[in-house]
Image (cartoon, rainbow, N blue to C red):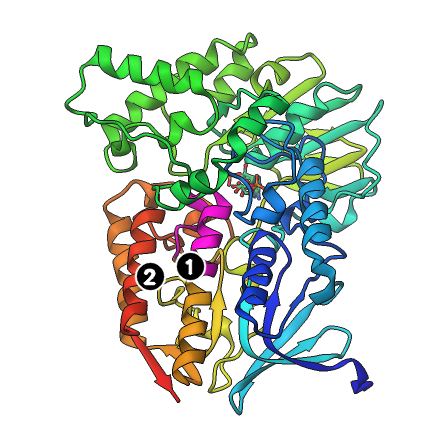
């Protein structure tokens, strides 16, 4: 083994998406020696990997950015909901302005992490070893791709792609027969885009998503300039909100509002576009079946009116509610419902005709469909997959997979018992996927920075959560979850999209604001932590 490329750093950040970039920026300010390793060849995280046609974020301008003045003062967004190319331009800009490359090592896949003698040792796939005192995992929620175990998947003779692994040069679909399996937020964007191209498109739909109108628009330069001086305040406000956007909440409860008032609220939220209809709606939709049905009915009325083909209409927006609204992640669309109406688009309802196998030249349901290209928009082993792939062992040598074999246990969604000085960002048991990404990422990184600066100042060598506190954090989340409709849908929030994964709520449900209060409180007197000095 060539040891010449091994190194030690005080702080090692794993992952170069929003979390990693913000952490690198903050650790430099703290004056610690810091390095960032990234599996890909560039910064960007999900925006480095997701290059499929139509890829775009569902968080609106100006909230989907980091509160780093050097970057936001000099970057112009062009659209209310930026595309993947615009987001890569954003990361390139951050990279140049902050000279991020100075502390970054790309194409570096961590595949073994152990603790001994007061430091973490990371084994890299190519044999290098990197050691550190503090390990900060910014590996994201959606890194480990989910490839369903379809019989015959390997036998397909055409082009098989997962949505997160599109070639940089794109895929030519002209004149081709293309299948898209899945209609989560990814599938919706791909279907909407490919439907407009000269191809025969088939969308395989198991659970129809409830997509909401994006109301995309260009951001004029003048509007951008007039808002720029408020970015700092707006981004702070997003961290003090429920879901990472400073949206309004309803003043009246669902049950106190009359039918006319409810209808007016729905219309107003619908007209705003984006996630307003989801995040500013009556909060009871999460717990109350009647409120949920009422919101569903409004959504179905609006959506059904956009689909002319009656068979397709019933597949994507059934008249009678079959699934709860908003407890599986909704997504945003521009003209998805008009797109699927086109004659070159076929919908296959997988509830009636499940996939039996993938064949050499297509997909077998109760009939055989021939394809040149199959796109798996089948999601991720979300929240835990990227962490487990690091093959982290606790101080006793037990793998994270063993520790979490009966379910995830973290303290504050930030640390794991038995894993001192290891911090997680955009992690399970935080409001992660229920929040606008940068808002929760910054909240967590800011906490890690405060914790480590306090440790350094007070001569504390290690911190580690006490088991009782971690167990209570977990129990509180699951108890809160039991009072909601989340357990009734098979979402990746619940780990329910991956066969064999423990079915449990993976998100903290109290909102970004309450989460921030809880983690700050724990820091005051190191509540729930064991320290060594
Ligand atoms: P999602 O949201 O997990 O969606 C995956 C889709 O793939 C969903 O429609 C699934 O149907 C479908 N799927 C998964 N496995 C199968 C099998 N075996 N057969 C048929 N259909 C299947 O992933 P996305 O990439 O769209 O979005 C991930 C996140 O990225 C998103 O939430 C945003 O945060 C951004 P199901 O609903 O399980 O019936």
Q: How much space separates mark 2 and mark 1, taking CA atoms?
A: 26 Å
Residue furthest to the bottom: 117
- Mark 2 or 1 closer to N-term? 1
Please check the rendered image and state whether residue 434 is part of the magenta-colored stretch, yes or no.
yes
Task: State the SS at label 1.
Answer: loop
Q: Residue at x 78, y 74 (%)?
A: 126
| Nearer to me, 49 or 216 | 216
Q: Is residue 163 above or below residue 474?
A: above
- Crowding around mark 2 (Cα neighbors within 10 Å: few <14, some 14 to 19, many 20+) is some
**Residue 422 visible in this rendered orientation of the protein:** yes
Q: Is residue 139 visible?
A: no
What residue is drawn where x is 80% and y is 19%? 198
* Secondary structure category for the residue under label 2: helix
Give x and y (percent) for residue 300. Answer: 41, 17
Q: Magenta: predominant secondary structure element?
A: helix
> What residue span does the magenta drawing correspond to?
430-446
Q: Which residue is mark 2?
A: 519
Front disc: 2 or 1: 2
* Residue bearing the label numbered 1: 502
Image quarter for residue 275? top left
Question: Is the residue at mark 1 in contact range of ligand 1, meaning its CB lies under 8 Å from it?
Answer: no
Quadrant for ligand 1 reads top right
């Amino acid at each position: 083994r060539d040891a010449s490329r091994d190194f030690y750093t005080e702080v090692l950040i794993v992952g170069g998406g929003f979390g990693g970039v913000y952490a690198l920026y903050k650790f430099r300010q703290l004056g610690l020696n810091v390095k960032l390793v990234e599996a890909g060849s560039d910064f960007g995280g999900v925006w480095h990997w997701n290059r499929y046609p139509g890829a775009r974020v569902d968080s609106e301008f100006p909230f989907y950015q980091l509160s780093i003045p050097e970057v936001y003062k000099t970057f112009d967004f062009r659209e209310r909901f930026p595309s993947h190319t615009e987001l890569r331009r954003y990361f390139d800009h951050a990279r140049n302005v902050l000279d991020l490359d100075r502390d970054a090592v790309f194409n570096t896949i961590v595949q073994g992490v152990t603790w001994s003698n007061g430091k973490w040792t990371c084994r890299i796939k190519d044999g290098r070893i990197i050691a550190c005192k503090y390990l900060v995992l910014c590996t994201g929620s959606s890194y480990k791709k989910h490839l369903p175990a379809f019989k015959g998947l390997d036998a397909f003779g055409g082009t098989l792609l997962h949505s997160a692994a599109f070639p940089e040069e794109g895929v030519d679909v002209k004149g081709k027969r293309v299948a898209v399996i899945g209609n989560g937020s990814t599938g919706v964007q791909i279907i909407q885009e490919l439907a407009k191209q000269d191809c025969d498109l088939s969308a395989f739909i198991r659970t129809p998503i409830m997509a909401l109108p994006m109301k995309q628009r260009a951001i004029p330069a003048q509007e951008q300039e007039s808002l720029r001086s408020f970015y700092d305040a707006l981004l702070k406000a997003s961290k003090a909100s429920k879901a990472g956007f400073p949206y309004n909440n309803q003043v009246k409860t669902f049950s106190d509002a009359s039918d006319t008032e409810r209808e007016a609220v729905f219309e107003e939220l619908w007209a705003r576009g984006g996630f307003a209809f989801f995040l500013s709606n009556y909060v009871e939709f999460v717990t109350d079946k009647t409120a949920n049905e009422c919101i569903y009915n409004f959504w179905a009325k609006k959506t059904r009116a956009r689909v002319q083909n009656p068979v397709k209409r019933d597949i994507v927006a059934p008249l009678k509610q079959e699934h709860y609204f908003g407890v599986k992640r909704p997504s945003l669309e521009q003209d998805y419902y008009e797109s699927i109406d086109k004659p070159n688009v076929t919908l296959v309802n997988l509830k009636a005709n499940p996939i039996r196998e993938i064949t050499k030249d297509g997909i077998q349901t109760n009939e055989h469909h021939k394809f040149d290209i199959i796109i798996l928009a089948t999601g991720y082993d979300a929240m835990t997959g990227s962490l487990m792939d690091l093959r982290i062992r606790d101080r006793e040598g037990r793998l994270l997979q063993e520790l979490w074999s009966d379910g995830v246990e973290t303290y504050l969604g930030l640390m794991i018992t038995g894993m001192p000085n290891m911090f997680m960002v955009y992690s399970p048991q935080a409001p992660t996927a229920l929040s606008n990404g940068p808002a929760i990422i910054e909240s967590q990184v800011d906490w890690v920075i405060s914790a480590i600066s306090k440790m350094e100042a007070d001569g504390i060598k290690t911190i580690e959560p006490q088991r009782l506190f971690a167990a209570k954090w977990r129990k509180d989340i699951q108890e809160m979850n039991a009072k909601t409709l989340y357990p009734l849908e098979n979402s990746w929030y619940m780990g329910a999209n991956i066969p064999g994964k423990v079915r449990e709520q993976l998100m903290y449900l109290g909102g970004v604001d309450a989460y921030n209060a809880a983690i700050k409180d724990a820091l005051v007197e190191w509540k729930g932590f064991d320290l060594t000095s």
